Amino acid sequence: MPLDLSPLKIVTKGLKTGDYSVQGYEDKIAIERKSLQDFIACCGKERARFEREIDRLDGYRYRAIVIEADWAAIDLKQYRGAMHPNAIVGSALGFALSNVSVIMAGDRIRAGKMIARMLWIAANRIHRGTDGFPQSMLGIDKAPEIA
């Protein structure tokens, strides 16, 4: 189910890695989105596959994993499965030490807002110091609001 990234202009197409990027910068920006249950699977039975994704993300200038939950949801075991919360937190911290930001967004709506803001920031940073930021690329002229 796609996130609401408004006010960004959205183009749907396959990416080499990650779930979200900026058109024209698919080789520089990659954001991976996970529901809590999805992330739990990535820490357990799908770990080998997910670690390959993490390795692919390493080639991107701007990269992150955004999880649609908060730390409390893990601590309170608000997920299906037998995996211990300490193992999940340890996996998240290990992924973060693998040079990819792990961001706990709280919920799906906030994840959309955070991803929209991160995409805008990353594209802006790529263009900083050149001929200016091509606002039309994202369809907006200022950073998306998070609050």
Image (cartoon, helix red, strand yellow):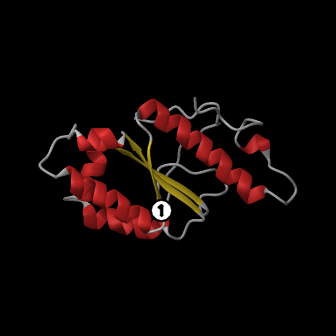
Of all residues shown, which one is farthest toward the right?
131
Q: Position of residue 17 (x, y in %)?
A: 47, 60
Q: Quadrant of the C terminus?
A: top right
Q: Is residue 42 left or right of residue 19?
A: left
Neighbours of disc 1 within 10 Å: few (<14), some (14-19), many (20+): many
Based on the displayed image, in which of its 4 quarters is residue 86 positioned?
bottom left
Nearest the viewer among 112 and 69 is: 69
Q: Is residue 128 above or below residue 81?
A: below
**Residue under the image location 72 percent in, 59 percent down:** 126
Q: Is residue 70 left or right of residue 30?
A: left
Q: Position of residue 138 (x, y in %)?
A: 70, 41
**Residue under the image location 30 percent in, 54 percent down:** 89
* Residue kind at label 1, given as amino acid type: Val
Q: Is residue 120 above or below residue 60?
A: above
Nearest the viewer among 145 and 50 is: 145
Q: Which residue is mark 1?
A: 100
**Residue under the image location 34 percent in, 43 percent down:** 71
Nearest the viewer among 54 and 105 is: 105
Q: Quadrant of the N terminus?
A: top left
**Residue under the image location 29 percent in, 60 percent down:** 90
Nearest the viewer among 82 and 50 is: 82
Of all residues shown, which one is farthest toward the left?
82
Based on the displayed image, in which of its 4 quarters is residue 130 positioned?
bottom right
SS of the residue at dot 1? loop
Q: Is residue 78 left or right of residue 135?
A: left
Q: Position of residue 118 (x, y in %)?
A: 60, 47
Q: Is residue 102 above or below residue 77?
A: below
